[in-house]
Image (cartoon, grey):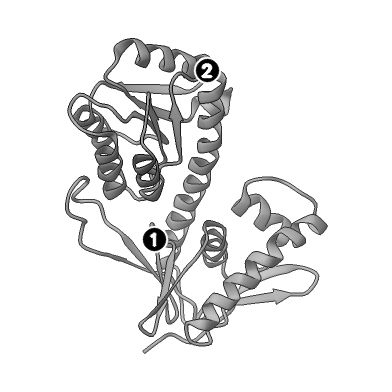
Amino acid sequence: MAERQLMRLLLVDGDGLSRYTVSMAMQRVGYMVGEAGSGEAALERLAQGDYDLVLAEIDLPDMNGIDLLKAIKNRSPDSVVILMADTVSVETAVEALRLGARDLLLKPFSSEDIRGSVERAIQTARRLRRRRRLLDSIERAVSDLTREFAVTADIESAPAQRGVGAGAHRNVIRLGPLSVLPGKYQVTAGGQSASLTPTEFDLLLYLAAHRGRVASCRELVREVRGYATDEEEAREVIRPHVSNLRRKLKELGDIDLIVNVRGVGYRLAEIAEAG
């Protein structure tokens, strides 16, 4: 319950009764719930404060929920959004998922249904929160970098995106010749790019934030995957993600960043700066 109270939900529904019912269902199990009766009101609330999750009705009085989803994702690509609807076409459902909706709930649904969907989405929100902490850790570490470490994390501010959330900045993280693009789950080098899974992305950032030391597999599972396990199981969990990450980096130009310290874990390699 205490952990849920730290999670903030924004509920967007033009139907006051439906909004009240869903809000109460979430508050009863400990979530903090903000409410908006229209898409424009939702965007205003999102501009005023951070929310871990948005629950939005597709049929809003002033805009389609799909348009709201687009606006939210343009403002913050990592936003976690669940859409709700009385009825929905296959085309709309596919479009919602393509644009990054975490779930699509059809009414009528039970309190258990929506709580389950929210709980699953909250796991994603927690993972994204951990990623934001990693980015902050890397940014703080920039000022402490010396020539001793050839691997650097140089944060550059790019122009803000047009549209909702103008003024927000997308960071580019430099790791030697590698550029890491938060929000896109992409890395680039030498004019080529590769897409990473969320776990691969978090793994790379965690090792970058803790460069100079070896992270055990158990630590990586706890911090990157979000649960505790013993070292033997952790090795089985982490190994395929490390293997896939290494392969993708090598395909960008034989970049070998991940070092396996046998019997201990993994660390970030020391590599020469590009240019």
In the displayed structure image, the side of residue 267 where residue 173 appears, left or right = left
> Closer to the observer: label 1 or label 2?
2
Q: Which residue is mark 2?
A: 111
| Label 1 – label 2 distance at C-alpha | 33 Å
Q: Residue furthest bottom?
A: 275
Above or below — where is 274 with respect to 110? Answer: below
Crowding at dot 1, Cα within 10 Å, few <14 / some 14-19 / many 20+, comes out as some
Question: Of the residues shown, which amino acid type is indicated by label 1?
Answer: Lys
- Residue, x 52% and y 17% (percent of image)? 111
Residue 31 image point, x, y percent: 48, 23
Q: Residue furthest front?
A: 90
Q: In which quarter of the view is residue 250 placed?
A: bottom right
Crowding at dot 2, Cα within 10 Å, few <14 / some 14-19 / many 20+, comes out as some
Q: In which quarter of the view is residue 237 placed?
A: bottom right
Question: Which one is earlier in the sequence, the residue at label 1 or at label 2?
Answer: 2
Above or below — where is 99 with respect to 151? Answer: above
- Residue, x 39% and y 60% (percent of image)? 184
In the displayed structure image, the side of residue 74 where residue 133 appears, left or right = right
Element type where label 1 sits in the image: loop
Q: Which residue is mark 1?
A: 184
Q: Residue furthest top?
A: 17
In the displayed structure image, the side of residue 233 where residue 199 appears, left or right = left
Q: In which quarter of the view is residue 178 placed?
A: bottom left
Above or below — where is 234 with respect to 130? Answer: below
Element type where label 2 sits in the image: helix
**Quick one: quadrant of the N terminus?**
top right
Question: Of the residues shown, which amino acid type is indicated by label 2?
Answer: Ser
**Quick one: quadrant of the C terminus?**
bottom left
Residue 49 image point, x, y percent: 30, 34
- Residue, x 64% and y 69% (percent of image)? 242
Q: How many marks?
A: 2
